[in-house]
Image (tube, grey):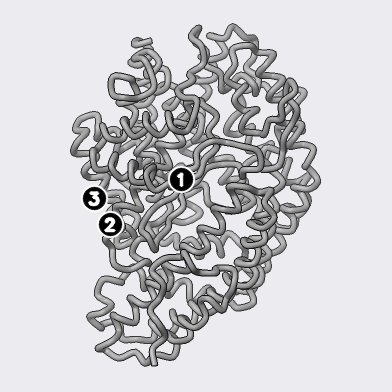
Amino acid sequence: MKFPPIPATTEHVDATQWETFAPYFTELNERPITPENTRQWIEDWSALSRLAWESGAMIYIEKSLDTADEEKEQAFLDFVNNVSPQIQIANQKLKERLLALDNGRPALADMKLALRHMRNEADLFRQDNVPLFTEIAKLSNEYDKVTGGLKANWDGDEKNLNQLGLYLQEKDREIRQRAWRTMMDLWLSQRENLNRIYADLLKLRRQMAENAGLPDYRAYSFREKGRFDYTPADCFTFHDAIEAVAAPAARRVYEKKRARLGLDALRPWDTDVDATDAPPLKPYQDQETLVQGSLNILSQVDPELGRNFAIMAEEELLDLQTRQGKALGGYCSTLPLRKRPFIFMNGVGIHDNVQTLLHEAGHAFHVFETAPLPLIWQIRSPMEFAEVASMSMELLAAPYLAKENGGFYTDSEAARARIEHLEGVLTFLPYMAVVDAFQHWVYLNPDEAMDAANCDVAWGKLWHRFMPDVDWSGLEDERVTGWHRKLHIFGAPFYYIEYGMAQVGALQIWRNSLQDQAGAVAAYRQALALGGTKTLPELFAAAGAEFRFDTEMLTELVALVEETVVELEAQI
């Protein structure tokens, strides 16, 4: 007798107990698969996967909204300890059953790429690695808890890292320096603790690679992330192009800022401040204002996209303001059962927060566009293209930031905001190269990397290679421990090159929009709607971009960015 239907919502689902999901997995594993029922079996597995995914996502969201809530943390740990490992094992059995079928069955006709990913995942799976995933999740949670809890007294008020970061926009240099040093003191106070967490993570990841019969964790990670369309060598080609093209452009940005600020040298607390005489951009004060302004902007990009964002606001799928105990960073989580996204971020009222929300909105639109795809595996586009969705939206929305479009700024302020964003693209690419190259070094030199002092040295050398023009004299500890301040290095190793690749894709979509805004947006949406049903190069092509990251491509795009900045400066 078939088990009762899979729940259509998580409302009455206890996601902390494996017994909640076990009967459904058991039934699927025991149900005979015939040519007549293959598609139904696949659709039932897809529905169960949606339930499990959304259940885990909600537990993670609740935990990150309040890292000090012990009950929410325990629910997360219960899911990590008791449920997620069992789901991995159960899914492996189902993958093996599906992969054993004749690929010619009509029920599998739309699953070509999904099956490729499943074969890779099934081949990579080792049951010995399941408890290691659990331990890694616990350590990543510890990193979130440690960093989310960092706070300091500031003129009688308690401020977290995000709130302190607001003062880096201040015109008063002494305030900027004080805020920066306060933040660095907080990070350095946890130096040994973070070193310990990282060493423990490295040990576990190294063991995972060995269990899978792979030479190192880099090889494991590239397989795990399904990187079928590029290799580590392509990453190094990208690094070289960034060093040749983007790093000099970033130096020009920093030199212009140094000269305009009238400084002998640009220090770390000077890089974020607006170098004009105008006051800092302060686009909004509360979440409601941020949401309304963003809704107006996104509706100008495309009315249907604006409606999707309005749905998120109506259904309370936005948590945008920082507060004590909230985890650092920002993200868009997919809730695949209800076919909705959830946006988490730490707003403090600066333009970077507007940019972050537009970025995460791009991810959210990806969720909406892929909603019609029938199977959960089809909605999983490669991460390199998922970030194209987000970074393109930042650029496509940029022309509508002014108040005349319902946005946040005067025309002059909008020009300043766009300059901040575009110059941020130029300074980001070298930083991305540091983060990615550091991880290649770490996982190819695991014995050396176990000693945090060697990590500090490696980070320092890469920083000098790509970002040498800010004066860190007297701040050696702060400079070489910069890897502590990038959560991807701890919780999502090798997940950072995607941002650089996606930026190159997004800049091409933006370039196209300068000639035909409506056409570029239409191609963007059509590409998003493909989800994971096409290869990475095919997805880029559908969006009107090339999947290449050489010096020639970067030279063209960096020149366009710099030319646009000059045009915008004339509007201030």
Question: How far apart are the two marked residues, 1 and 2, measured between alpha carbons?
Answer: 22 Å
**Numbered badge on residue 78:** none
- Nearest the camera: 396 or 294? 294
Q: Residues at badges 3 and 2 in contact (C-beta under 8 Å)?
A: yes
- Nearest the camera: 178 or 199? 178
Mark 1 crowd level (few <14, some 14–19, many ≥20, 10 Å Cα):
many
Which residue is painted at 60% across and 42% down in the image? 328
Residue 10 position within the rendered picture, expressed as x and y whole percent measured from the top left: 46, 65
- Helix, strand or loop for disc 1: strand
Q: Which residue is mark 2?
A: 530
Mark 3 crowd level (few <14, some 14–19, many ≥20, 10 Å Cα):
some
Question: For the N terminus, which image quadrant?
Answer: bottom left
Q: Mark 1 is on which residue type?
A: Ile
- Counting residues from the start of the chain, the first of labels 3 and 1 encountered is 1
Residue 455 showing in the rendered view: yes
- Nearest the camera: 103 or 248? 103
Question: How far apart are the two marked residues, 3 and 1, measured between alpha carbons?
Answer: 22 Å
Identify the residue at the far front of this view. 12
Q: Is residue 302 left or right of residue 211?
A: left
Q: Which residue is mark 3?
A: 526
Residue 412 position within the rendered picture, expressed as x and y whole percent measured from the top left: 37, 13
Q: Which residue is mark 1?
A: 343
Residue 448 position within the rendered picture, expressed as x and y whole percent measured from the top left: 75, 53
Q: Mark 2 is on which residue type?
A: Leu
Q: Please say if 422 is above or below 505.
A: above
